[in-house]
Image (cartoon, helix red, strand yellow):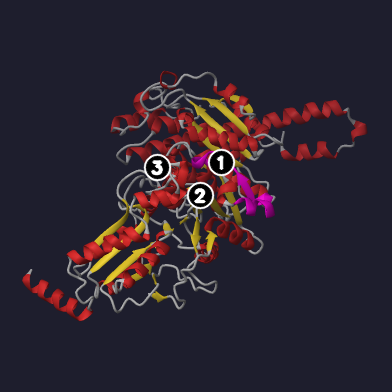
Amino acid sequence: MSSSENEIKNKNQEDSLRDAFGKTLTSLGDTHTDVVVIDADVSKSTKTSIFAEKFPQRFFNVGISEQDMVSIGAGLASCKKKPFVVAFASFLTLRGLDQIRNMVCYSNLDVKFVGTHAGLATGEDGATHQALEDISIMRSIPNMEVFSPSDAVEVVQIVKYLVRKKGPAYLRLPRTLGTTIHKTNYLFEPYKIEALNDLNDTNIVIFSTGMMVSKSIQAIEILKQKEIKIGLVNVHTIKPIDTDSITRILSHTKLIITIEDHNIVGGLGSSLAEIIAESNFRVRLLRLGINNNFGESGSVEQLYDKHGLTPEKIAEKILDISKNMELLKNNDKNETQQRIQERRHSC
Amino acid sequence: MDHTEIVEIGQTKSTERDLKDDCILYSSTISTIKDTIAKRLMEKAANIRKRVVLMISQTSSGHVGGCFSSTDLLTSLYFYKMRIDVKNPDWEDRDRFILSKGHAAPLLYSILIECGFLTEEDQYTLRNINSRLQGHPSMQITPGVDMTTGSLGMGLSAGCGMAIAAKLENKSNKIYVLLGDGELQEGQVWEAIMTASHFRLNNIIAIVDKNNLQSDSPVKSVSNTGDVATQFKSFNWNVLEINGHNFLEIMDALDTASNSIIKPTVIIANTRKGKGVSFMENNPKYHAISLTEQDTNNALTEIKPN
């Protein structure tokens, strides 16, 4: 498990993750001449337009045809090219799923998928455009790796990694700007969780991903005012997930909260549920996200508010459940360990 | 007329002969050569049909009808036209072939055995567990398979990807994609048709095995939307229509297609499902079937160069 050596930076700097993606990929285009970018007529939105401008011969807008674009990627990869197939997350992972599964992943081809406009963070376009199940879908395909960055700095690192790595991968990006929480010299370690604070003096830990990481940071600040210590882990690699590190955390945890701009069915929360259920530890799980609903139109802030994904509402939910579980009396590890022993003996 | 005579003619100075006589002589020479090739291909195709029957008879079921309608086309492609290297299945400059109608896998496998990409040991392993011959072609598992298929409608798109890659590398290899006519119902095929046209992928040659039957019933009773040739033409493709069981026509079409400068080409091959075995021909029952011993024996007896 990697512990971030940087303090959590929660100032108001907001950057575009999409821009970070477009710019980074473009900057790598000179040295990685096998990179080819395919877009489905949304390149101004996905920011592949930046790559297109510098490398017009290696950029292909195939039009509004997600099925076609995925299979084109398969064909390119079979000829030693390194395609980045980019479109809105919802259409790419749903419309193009048969092709992603049966051509790319089944043959383990070197195709990278980038889905933008993921989550409620898509905003006013509404339900059809808000991908709320893309993590779940991509996670369930063998050979597919799933990356969900928390800020623009992380995007830069992930893109650099994806250009070097072989095999299918899915990168999930929001439409909105995101609060930058990492310093520019952040060391991204793929397949490892990132602890954003000291996990050792608490028995309540949040596991969050994407846009919800910065919300979690704010929620933790709110609870800190009430002298409640909550740990925070950034899960940027959802598949393959860092089971070993997470299991080590379970050993001294009573309550885990997962927070994602995604359906609580099948995404990060379900990943944690799988690990917890298969572990030796009895840990309570609270999954926060979109509660098996579709999205809708609204500003991003309004949507987050309606679905309980603001720092205040998150803090409130954590407070509630912690009280119910009687976790807050001392927020004390030793007492919790004793209780764990007692419960084990009474079972 | 043998090879030595041809060389001698070529070395004769043109002042000594009328050029027109030369052309007539050349073209009749070539047509004699092509006749010879056609005969060889016919024999090859018969062998391959036998392999297909044997392969399918050893396993639970197989799509024998759709294999037979494509046999003459694919035999010509592999043994007359395609630039491939059996010793180097991954040769970067090779022509590519995509079996978009992936259920005709037994046909592809039979050809790959006949070529030498696969061995006689593979002949009876179709659809067995741990086999190199999966129910539908898998590029990771089977040498000689250029693209994984099985879910219909995807092959032409993958072909576009390969065609684009070739152009990026300034390579002159061709990409051949075999589709079924029922398969044209998949919308993605038309996405790919648009892509190939728009990006001027003249190095793509699609072949439609138009046997007029699909799984449940005749194609026209499922989806009757006019003439396939007209549809392709309207998307700005070169269109050739041939008898898909006439080797001379197939060879000529492949040659014409490979000379296309801007447009992709489709060869619409009129075929008969189950061609080569009388009781299978045009018989929907043989779309996908488990071959009985009787069927197998009767088929093997009947199959001959034709």
Looking at the image, which residue is at 45% across and 63% down? A150
* Outermost residue, right side: B15
Is residue A61 in the magenta section? Answer: yes
Q: Are marks 2 and 3 in contact (CB under 8 Å)?
A: no
The reply to whether residue A192 is in sight is yes
Residue A301, percent from left and from top: 43, 52
- Residue identifier under label 1: B78
Q: Nearer the viewer, residue A105 or B182?
A: A105
* Outermost residue, front side: A225
Q: Respond whether the residues carrying marks 1 and 2 are from the same subunit.
A: yes
Q: Chain of mark 3?
A: A
- Residue identifier under label 2: B144
The circle on residue A86 is none
- Residue identifier under label 3: A296
In this view, the mark in front (1 or 2): 2
Residue B164, percent from left and from top: 62, 46
Write the start and end of the magenta stretch as one range.
A48-68
In this view, the mark in front (3 or 1): 3
Earlier along the polypeptide chain: callout 1 or callout 2?
Answer: 1
Considering only vertical position in the picture, is B52 above or below A110?
above
CA gap, disc 3 to disc 1?
54 Å
Going by the numbered disc 2, the residue's amino acid type is Gly
Q: Quadrant of residue B157?
A: top right
> Judging from the image, what secondary structure is the residue with disc 1 in?
helix
Q: Nearer the viewer, residue B294 or A141?
A: A141
CA gap, disc 1 to disc 2?
11 Å
Considering only vertical position in the picture, is A145 above or below B18?
below
Q: Chain of mark 2?
A: B
Looking at the image, which residue is at 30% across and 69% down? A205
Residue A304, percent from left and from top: 38, 52
